Image (cartoon, grey):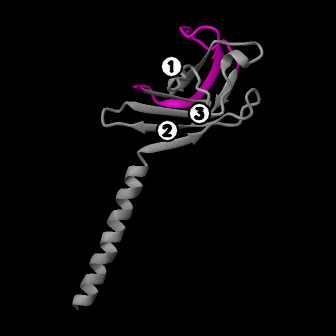
């Protein structure tokens, strides 16, 4: 009877561990950007986590993204936009690198928090970082989340 009890405990432990792993991984959603026709080598991902205050933490990492001044026509900045579940569009920030706008390794990232539920994340190339609605071409997009 002790062997059965030990096996049952082992099975229950494995099930409990699996549920914890699934529960924690369900809190973070990772989405890949689609391939860009404007900057074909660019690739990136968005990680969205909902916190205990019902805010959404958004982490964006992009690789191989050409400097905006090298685009045709040249631009000055990459902006990240979020379409929210209320169908509004929010400028959530500038795509930054560790040393300048874009480093020589062509890595860029953004981390922000918002109370709005994101339904789509996209990046545009713009002349001005303070605009409130996208005016430039869409470089990367997640599609609908």
**Residue 39, position as x, y percentages in the image:** 73, 28
Residue segment shown in magenta: 113-137
Q: Which residue is mark 1?
A: 93
Secondary element under disc 3, as helix, strand or loop, is strand
**Residue at 59%, 23% in the rendered image:** 102
Secondary element under disc 2, as helix, strand or loop, is strand
**Residue 95, position as x, y percentages in the image:** 55, 23
Is residue 69 or residue 28 the one in the foreground? 69
Q: Would you place residue 22 above or below residue 72 in this image? A: below
Upstream in the sequence, badge 3 or badge 2? 2
Q: Which residue is mark 3?
A: 62
The reply to whether callout 1 and callout 3 are in contact (CB within 8 Å) is no
**Residue at 43%, 49% in the rendered image:** 26
Residue 116 within the magenta-colored segment of the rendering: yes
Q: Which residue is mark 2?
A: 47
Which of label 1 and label 3 is nearer to you? Answer: 3
Q: Dot 3, how many residues are within 10 Å of its Cα: few (below 14), some (14-19), or many (20+)?
A: many
Distance (Cα) linking label 2 and label 1: 15 Å
Which of label 3 and label 2 is nearer to you? Answer: 3
Residue 123 within the magenta-colored segment of the rendering: yes
Locate residue 39 relative to residue 3 in the image: left or right.
right
Secondary element under disc 1, as helix, strand or loop, is strand
Locate residue 2 relative to residue 16 in the image: left or right.
left
Distance (Cα) linking label 1 and label 3: 14 Å
Locate residue 77 relative to residue 93 in the image: left or right.
right
Q: Residue furthest left?
A: 2
Q: Would you place residue 46 above or below residue 69 in this image? A: below
């Amino acid at each position: 009877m002790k062997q059965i009890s030990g096996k049952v405990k082992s099975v229950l432990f494995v099930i409990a561990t699996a549920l914890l792993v699934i529960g924690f991984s369900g809190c973070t959603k990772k989405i890949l950007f689609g391939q860009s026709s404007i900057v074909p080598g660019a690739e990136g991902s968005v990680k969205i986590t909902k916190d205990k205050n019902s805010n959404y933490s958004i982490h964006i990492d992009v690789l191989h993204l050409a400097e905006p001044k090298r685009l045709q026509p040249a631009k000055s900045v990459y902006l990240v936009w979020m379409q929210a579940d209320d169908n509004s569009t929010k400028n959530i920030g500038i795509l930054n690198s560790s040393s300048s706008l874009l480093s020589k390794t062509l890595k860029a990232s953004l981390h922000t928090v918002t109370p709005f539920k994101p339904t789509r994340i996209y990046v545009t190339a713009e002349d001005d970082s303070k605009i409130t609605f996208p005016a430039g071409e869409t470089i990367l997009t997640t599609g609908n989340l």
